[in-house]
């Protein structure tokens, strides 16, 4: 099982950094609609097969976010 809620994580990080998904899309060279699609479709970010394999091995997957030092 993927423990994190990727959609909420990205939204919270956007609020913390005072940035929008549109700004992120522009910075990484893609469209705002594509960024939104990726965020909402969790299994496309984290492979369903990978999650299934880790679950079969008895593990849950948890993402940790560490802010880079400037």
Image (cartoon, rainbow, N blue to C red):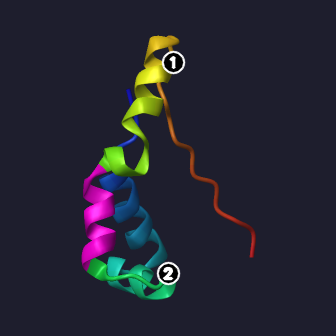
* 66 to 24, vertically: above or below: above
For marks 2 and 1 on the same chain, the one whose residue lies earlier in the sequence? 2
The dot on residue 2 is none
Residue ranking furthest to the right: 69
39 lies left or right of 52: left
**Number of dots carrying numbers:** 2
Determine the residue positioned at 32% across, 54% down: 8
Question: Residue most toward the front?
Answer: 49
Q: Which residue is tagged 1?
A: 59
Q: Residues within 10 Å of mark 1 (few under 14, many from 20)?
A: few
Q: Residue at x 34, y 64 (%)?
A: 11
Q: Nearer the viewer, residue 66 or 24?
A: 24
Q: Quadrant of the C terminus?
A: bottom right
Which segment is the magenta one?
Answer: 33-41
Which image quarter: residue 32? Answer: bottom left
Q: Main secondary structure of the magenta part?
A: helix
Q: Position of residue 24 (x, y in %)?
A: 43, 80
Task: Count neighbours of disc 2 (C-alpha within 10 A) and say few if under 14, some if 14 to 19, many if 20 or more.
Answer: few
Instruction: Report how far apart the C-alphas of labels 2 and 1 lie in the structure.
Output: 32 Å
Residue 28 position within the rendered picture, expressed as x and y whole percent measured from the top left: 50, 81
* Residue 33 pos. (x, y %): 24, 76
> Disc 2 designates what residue?
28
| Numbered disc 1: secondary structure | loop
| Residue 67 within the segment the image draws in magenta | no
Q: CB under 8 Å between callouts 2 and 1? A: no
Rendered position, 12 above or below 61: below
Dividing the picture into quarters, in which one does residue 26 lie? bottom left
In the rendered image, the vertical position of residue 32 relative to residue 59, given as above or below: below
Question: Residue 9: which quarter of the image?
Answer: bottom left
Q: Dot 2 lies on which element?
A: helix
Residue 1 horizontal/vertical position (percent)? 38, 26
């Amino acid at each position: 099982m993927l423990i994190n809620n990727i959609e909420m994580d990205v939204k919270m990080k956007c609020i913390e950094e005072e940035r929008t998904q549109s700004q992120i899309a522009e910075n990484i060279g893609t469209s705002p609609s594509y960024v939104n699609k990726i965020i909402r479709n969790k299994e496309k970010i984290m492979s369903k097969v990978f999650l299934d394999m880790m679950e079969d091995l008895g593990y849950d997957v948890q993402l940790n976010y560490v802010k880079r030092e400037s």
